[in-house]
Amino acid sequence: MTVLIGTSDKEAVAGVSGSSTTFNGVIGYTTAKGHAGVAGVCDSGEGNGVYGRSGLANGVIGYASGEGGCGVVGDSKKYNGVLGITHTDAHSGVAGICESPSNGNGVLGHARGAGVGVYGLSEKGTGVFGTSKSGRAGFFHGDVEVTGDIILSGADVAEQFDISEVGSEGQKVLPGSVVVLDDQGRITLTSQAYDHRVAGIVSGAGDRKPALVLDRHHPTSAERQPLAVVGKAWCLADATDAPIAVGDILTTSTRPGHARRATPSIEAIGSLIGKALTPLAHGTGTVLVLVGLG
């Protein structure tokens, strides 16, 4: 039985209208399982089941306090389950926010069939944008297919390595350091010239950050650091004995964690770090290096 029925056959006249200046215009309650406090149904081919509009706040807001319940659910047989549109710069058609202090998702997409869990379309901006202050901006469980370019803002491809308990002379292994391998395959600061155990340069010094880090077991820490294997990286350098010019080949130095200019010789083979892209006339400092072991 329906307690209240409103009908209208006139154009622009509502079947039921509610108005309030201090509370909700219309409010509906139900305790029946599987039913709605307020339900909107449109049998027309072009109308909306529920329509919400607001000048300053939300057009539609949904709230759920029970486990397994959703604040808003969209279900469609032939089109989008949920469609979000915005006409304002710097805002999103659909925005997802998770305020859980431990583990949750801002937006979760799941496809049971051959469809797409999350689909973003943009003519000039970003189709899908994810951001996180401490976790992952995006997480994919399964294959990812990209038909266009992947644009990476970093300067090198790096691979994480375990670090020895201490570097040479007790110094820490920091970004920009030249490192060598120990007997366990971990990295430690170089401390001799033309060291054939050279592993490369620790990535991340200055304004050059790694674009891609391989073998990442956990975030960069005192136990593991990314080592630049290809690309450009800033490197600690020592030009005390020989100035470094652009184009010079670099090798390990006796100064812990530093590179020096290599002289053409048989001993240089297997101990090269890369090619200098910036000069260092004297003393110690940093040099931008095109990484390439040899």
Image: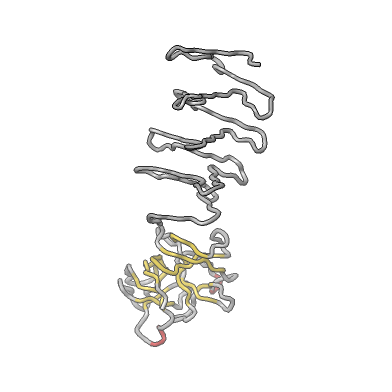
Q: 161 above or below 131?
A: below
Left/right of residue 278 with respect to residue 10 in the rendered view: left
Q: Residue furthest bottom?
A: 266
Figure quadrant of the N terminus: top right
143 or 244, nearer to the observer: 143
Residue beneath the point at 56% across and 73% down: 186
Q: How many marks?
A: 0
Figure quadrant of the C terminus: bottom left
Residue 17 at what x, y percent from top left?
Answer: 52, 14
Residue 191 at what x, y percent from top left?
Answer: 49, 77
Residue beneath the point at 56% across and 75% down: 185
Q: Residue furthest left?
A: 246
Question: From this viewpoint, is residue 19 visible?
Answer: no
Residue beneath the point at 43% across and 60% down: 211
290 or 252, nearer to the observer: 290
Residue 84 at what x, y percent from top left?
Answer: 45, 35
Residue beneath the point at 44% across and 44% down: 120
Q: 67 above or below 27?
A: below
Q: 78 above or below 268?
A: above
Question: From this viewpoint, is residue 255 visible?
Answer: yes
187 or 239, nearer to the observer: 187
